[in-house]
Image: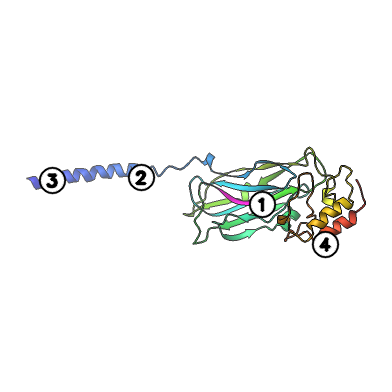
Amino acid sequence: MLKKSALIFYGLVLFLAGLVLPVFAQYPTATPPISNIGVYFSPQTATVPPETTMRIMMNSGGRGVSFARVVFNFDPSLIRLTSEITPNPNLSTVVEKTSMATANASGHVVIVIAASPSDIPPNGIFEFASFGIDSNTSLSNLTGDITFDILDGQIVDEGGSQIPATYVNASININSGSFCPRGSLGNLNCSADGCIDTADYEIFRQAFGKTQAEIIVPSGQASPDLVQDNNNIIDTADYEIIRANFGSCQ
């Protein structure tokens, strides 16, 4: 009799478990709302000059990111990249990354990177990539946007699922307020008359042979790295700009 009662009891438990477990299965682990998941520039508003570091930030909502494609555009007549793009080291497999020279010629940048087997896929809020920008015009008080191509972007988590995201662009104030007239032509001391003279040549002479990273451009002066190339070295190409404009004023 006891055995029969025990069988009835265990049968009832299994029956109830069969009802309860499917209910819990309908509610997977909660994830942050999609509105909190996104790709954005930091800072979202910047002023150039001086040269400014722009960071592409991601909020993955707590999901590990194993692959991402980010595309953005800018007006190369107003803004130029001053460095190569540096990706997140935990997405170390570089599938595609636009060079600084190509970006400055086209105003179009593609970054496609993925986590290698030895990487720890980043999650939460993290820096996806960074790069430097500066003004590329002598005109003043302009605004240029750096805009994501949201239709060409993709973020994938560790499980292979796409992560939906919002995108927030950046607004760049260009040569607002005081700026350096004809700085890109060699007016390195930013004199108000825009003249390229011996004072500018002396600034250039002291920087000759060094890379952009090795010099500090004081406030109120322009960078002697007048020609953007892969090595960012102040060299004869930059000297040619000084030489061609020496003695001229605006």
Upstream in sequence: badge 2 or badge 3 = 3
Label 2 or label 1, whichever comes before in sequence order: 2
Quadrant for the C terminus, please. top right
Identify the residue position indicated by label 4 in the image.
236
How many numbered marks have been drawn onto this rendered protein structure?
A: 4
Q: Quadrant of residue 35?
A: top right
Which of pointers 1 and 4 lies earlier in the amino acid sequence? Answer: 1
**Viewer-nearest residue: 16 or 31:** 31
Q: CA distance from mark 4 to mark 3?
A: 94 Å
**Residues under labels 1 and 3: Cα distance?**
71 Å
Report which residue position mark 3 lands on: 6
Discs 4/3, front: 4
Q: Which residues are magenta?
A: 126-131
Q: Residues within 10 Å of mark 3 (few under 14, many from 20)?
A: few
Mark 4, Cα crowd under 10 Å, few <14 / some 14-19 / many 20+, is few
Disc 2: which residue: 25
Quarter location, residue 141: top right
Image quarter in which the N terminus is found: top left
Amino acid of disc 2: Ala
Q: Disc 3 residue type?
A: Ala
Q: Is residue 245 left or right of residue 120?
A: right
Tag 1 residue: 131
What's the residue type where badge 1 is placed?
A: Phe
Residue type of the residue flagged with mark 4? Thr
Q: Residue 152: give x, y in percent of width and height.
A: 62, 51
Mark before the other along the chain sequence, 4 or 3: 3
Pick the residue in front: 178 or 56: 178
Q: Measuring from the top left, give residue 204's x and y in whole percent.
A: 82, 55
Percent position of residue 11, x then y: 19, 46
